[in-house]
Amino acid sequence: MRRLQPKSNLSLFGSQAVFRPRWLKYYFLFKPDPGWKADKHRIADLLEESGHSKIAHRVRTCMERVAVFKCGNPDCGQTELRIPFTCKTFICPECCKTAFFSRYREYEKVFKGLTLPAGHRLQFITLTQRHSQNELPSTVALKKLFKDARKFVNRLYPRKSKAGALGVLEIGKNKNIHVHLVVVGKVYSRSEMSRLWYKITGDSYILDRKDVTDTQGRPDPEGALRYILKYIKRPLAFDSLHDAVDYLLLMQKFRRVRTFWVFYHLT
């Protein structure tokens, strides 16, 4: 791995920085959203008013400050690298797209080489937890949702059966909370899964299941990966900037992507 030294007027990460091309190229695949550029400064003001100055600075300067690096070897001929600073929040359209491309590249090889054991199918399962509409869930509610999802996967798709799942959290338009799963495992009837989900949660029974196939009816692992990661590609739409701030603070330390069994090593 090649190491680059920053210019003297930018002392970043000590005296050296690691160049990772597969991370950097995604920052230049799209243009900044003009609407977000205006909103982010208002959001940063609200964050500063609530005492979150560090997060406010990250949001305010996202995609606006650039670190410049060049190789320390005078004979290298390497052109300058300009790497934008990003806020890495779940409300920023640019950072959500970057997260999508980065995750896709990270998981792509595993999904391309995915083989299904006998009797297993590749399927989508959506688990929905009952929640007060139009109110953001608490961190406790989100943790409970993933804890219940893990119980569901462990019960139907245990490790010893060579099954597994990749799950992504989604907060819907009405603030409903879901876990979307790509599952490798046996097929169960919807009624059987619904009864189990109600038994685990105590109040929720709504779920959905469908096979993941291409136009010729064959399992489509790459299509499954693109579909499941779309839930981190688009930020949630907010009625007000105060809602956006509440969501940012809710999700800043919460992992939206979880893995189970055969996919466990991905995260």
Image: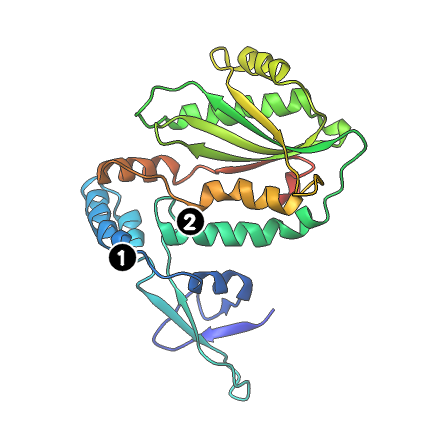
- Left or right? Give the position of 86 relative to 152: left
* Residue 61 image offset from top left, x and y in percent: 29, 58
In the rendered view, would you say 89 is above or below 82?
above
Front residue of 46 and 16: 46
* Residue 35 image offset from top left, x and y in percent: 25, 52
Tag count in the figure? Answer: 2
* Residue 248 image offset from top left, x and y in percent: 33, 40
* Residue 144 image offset from top left, x and y in percent: 48, 23
What residue do we see at 58% from left, 11% from top? Answer: 195
The quarter of the image holding the C terminus is top right
The quarter of the image holding the N terminus is bottom right
Find disc 2 in the rendering and name its residue.
96
Callout 1 secondary element = helix
Front residue of 104 and 68: 104
- Corner quadrant of residue 76: bottom right
Front residue of 193 and 90: 193
Find disc 1 in the rendering and name its residue.
34
Callout 2 secondary element = helix
Earlier-in-chain disc, 1 versus 2? 1
- Left or right? Give the position of 23 relative to 235: right
**Neighbours of disc 2 within 10 Å: few (<14), some (14-19), many (20+):** many
**Neighbours of disc 1 within 10 Å: few (<14), some (14-19), many (20+):** few
